[in-house]
Image (cartoon, rainbow, N blue to C red):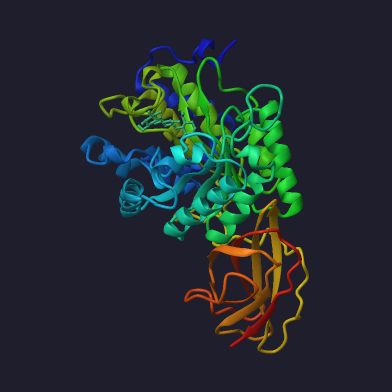
């Protein structure tokens, strides 16, 4: 039996009755509902924020001039995901020629609205520009790294979370990776993407994002195993996105909360990232209520994004899967979502009465999840610094991530010396400037990372052609 064929709880009742009944569905949380009603928000974003979460939407640049669309966007949503404008074909239409106009328009509008940004997406088998579709092997691997660095450098500091890798697993029961040109560069392409992303913007949350993983099944088990492996090996990953595209073939199942929770228990945030649920009326509202409630019941579920604003904006508009009808009117599903947000639990239990401000869902900076593979070569001393390097390698290339740590007093500038392996040549450097591209190289701080407080660290990195071997960094401080 599909969710769409379930008997709806309310048939054709007036909206007021639905509101009342939807609150009743939260029987277990009735006290919370009552306690928070005084501060209950009247928009999706405000209501989610009261619980330390966000409520977002996919945004299309070519609709920003539509006043109905723009009005609802501003009023209701405090997170934005560009629907197509940050994809690889949009941001790097020709190799190494980046194009950010449409994506910038979304960032600028959403930021002006007070909303945050989810970046979508850096490495994906789909919507690759022609030049990338035709690439393979080391050239493609290097192009992927260059793309991540190029896009993340442009948006550095402006993105709450990036979908670093999108849809890398097969559907069905195999639990295998999806075949693609990226996958054929080597199974480590996903972790290379995440390590590259961490170095490019250390403040951004780094997410894996996929569909048909909302419940527990072979595909979500495979993603779970990957996240578990990444956590155990220190590959940087902060969050897992569950797209949440539901219809009668892909119904809302009763295990989505348990599925979110098991991922959260691995130490990652979880989010619904592209939610849409085909249907109408109270049956649709009921399904939305269940999805939102699942998120509210998981403290590390930090937010929900719907994949468009009005039904007419949807990639599958025939299924009328969104919260606003094509004229921009609120549907029953909207009311169900709003009530569920207002009745839900906070991300972190409040110590007193409901928070009046938006409590942070995450610490402001990411803890270092990527431990150095080599111990520091020169232990920090008074006024000094130390450096350690971790390597991500593949045949014919590598990425080095170098951690610079201040000693017992702060430093005002640093320089790290390394001798590159014979034949290696640097093709890209981030968060540092370098004196040469091969042989003996001095890396120096750039304007924003020269100052390091005592005992604290910063990271820079570079990508090189050629085969890696152990490198021994030395650090000197000013
Ligand atoms: O397919 C739904 C989503 C599944 N998860 C990843 C998302 O990135 C994906 O979004 C959709 C967009 O909503 C569509 O708008 O991705 C589609 C492509 O994979 C997008 O469709 C494309 C059309 O295929 C193109 O013909 C069109 O030029 O949208 C483009 C821009 O309108």
Say whether residue 202 is visible. no
- Seen at 71% across and 67% down, the residue is 421
The answer to whether 282 appears left or right of 464 in the picture is: left
Q: In which quarter of the view is residue 10 placed? A: top left
Pinpoint residue 236: horizontal percent, then vertical percent: 65, 54
Q: In which quarter of the view is residue 158 placed? A: bottom left
Pinpoint residue 228: horizontal percent, then vertical percent: 73, 44
- Seen at 70% across and 58% down, the residue is 467
**Outermost residue to the front:** 423
The answer to whether 102 appears left or right of 132 in the picture is: left
Pinpoint residue 342: horizontal percent, then vertical percent: 46, 39
In the depicted view, which residue is nearer to us: 331 or 34? 331
Say whether residue 144 is visible. yes
Image quadrant in which the N terminus is located: top right
In the depicted view, which residue is nearer to us: 273 or 379? 379
Vertical position of residue 217 compared to residue 142: above or below: above
């Amino acid at each position: 039996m599909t969710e769409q064929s379930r008997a709806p709880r309310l048939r054709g009742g007036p909206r007021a009755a639905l509101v009342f009944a939807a609150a009743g569905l939260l029987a277990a949380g009735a006290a919370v509902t009552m306690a928070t009603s005084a501060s209950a928000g009247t928009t999706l974003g405000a209501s989610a924020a009261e619980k330390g979460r966000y409520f977002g939407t996919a945004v299309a640049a070519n609709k920003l001039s539509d006043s109905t669309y723009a009005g609802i966007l501003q009023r209701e949503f405090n997170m934005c995901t560009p629907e197509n404008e940050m994809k690889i074909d949009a941001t790097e239409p020709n190799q190494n020629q980046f194009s950010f106009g449409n994506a910038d328009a979304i960032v600028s509008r959403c930021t002006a609205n007070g909303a945050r940004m989810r970046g979508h997406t850096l490495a994906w088998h789909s919507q690759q520009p022609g030049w990338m579709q035709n690439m393979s092997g080391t050239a493609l691997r290097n192009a992927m790294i260059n793309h991540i660095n190029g896009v993340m450098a442009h948006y550095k500091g402006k993105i709450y979370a990036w979908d670093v890798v999108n849809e890398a697993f097969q559907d069905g029961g195999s639990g295998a990776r999806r075949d693609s040109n990226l996958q054929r560069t080597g199974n480590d392409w996903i972790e290379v993407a995440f390590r590259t992303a961490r170095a490019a913007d250390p403040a951004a949350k780094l997410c894996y994002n996929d569909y048909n993983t909302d419940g527990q099944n072979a595909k979500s088990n495979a993603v779970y195993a990957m996240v578990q492996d990444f956590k155990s090996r220190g590959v940087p990953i902060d969050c897992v996105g569950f797209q949440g595209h539901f219809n009668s073939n892909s119904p809302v199942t009763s295990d989505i909360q348990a599925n979110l929770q098991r991922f959260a228990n691995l130490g990652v945030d979880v989010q619904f990232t592209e939610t849409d649920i085909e249907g109408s009326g109270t049956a649709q509202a009921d399904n939305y209520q269940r999805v939102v409630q699942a998120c509210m019941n998981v403290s590390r579920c930090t937010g929900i994004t719907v994949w468009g604003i009005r039904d007419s904006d949807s990639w599958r508009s025939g299924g009328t899967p969104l919260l606003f009808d094509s004229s921009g009117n609120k549907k029953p599903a909207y009311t169900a979502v709003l009530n569920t947000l207002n009745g839900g639990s906070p991300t972190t239990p409040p110590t007193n009465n409901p928070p009046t401000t938006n409590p942070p869902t995450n610490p402001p900076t990411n803890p270092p999840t990527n431990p150095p593979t080599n111990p520091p070569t020169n232990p920090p001393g008074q006024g000094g610094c130390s450096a350690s390097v971790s390597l991500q390698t593949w045949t014919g290339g590598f990425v080095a991530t170098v951690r610079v740590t201040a000693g017992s007093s702060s430093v005002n500038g640093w320089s790290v010396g390394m001798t590159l392996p014979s034949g290696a040549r640097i093709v890209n450097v981030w968060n540092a400037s370098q004196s040469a591209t091969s042989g003996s190289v001095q890396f120096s701080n750039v304007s924003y990372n020269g100052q390091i407080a005592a005992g604290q660290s910063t990271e820079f990195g570079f990508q090189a052609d050629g085969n890696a071997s152990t490198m021994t960094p030395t650090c000197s401080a000013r």
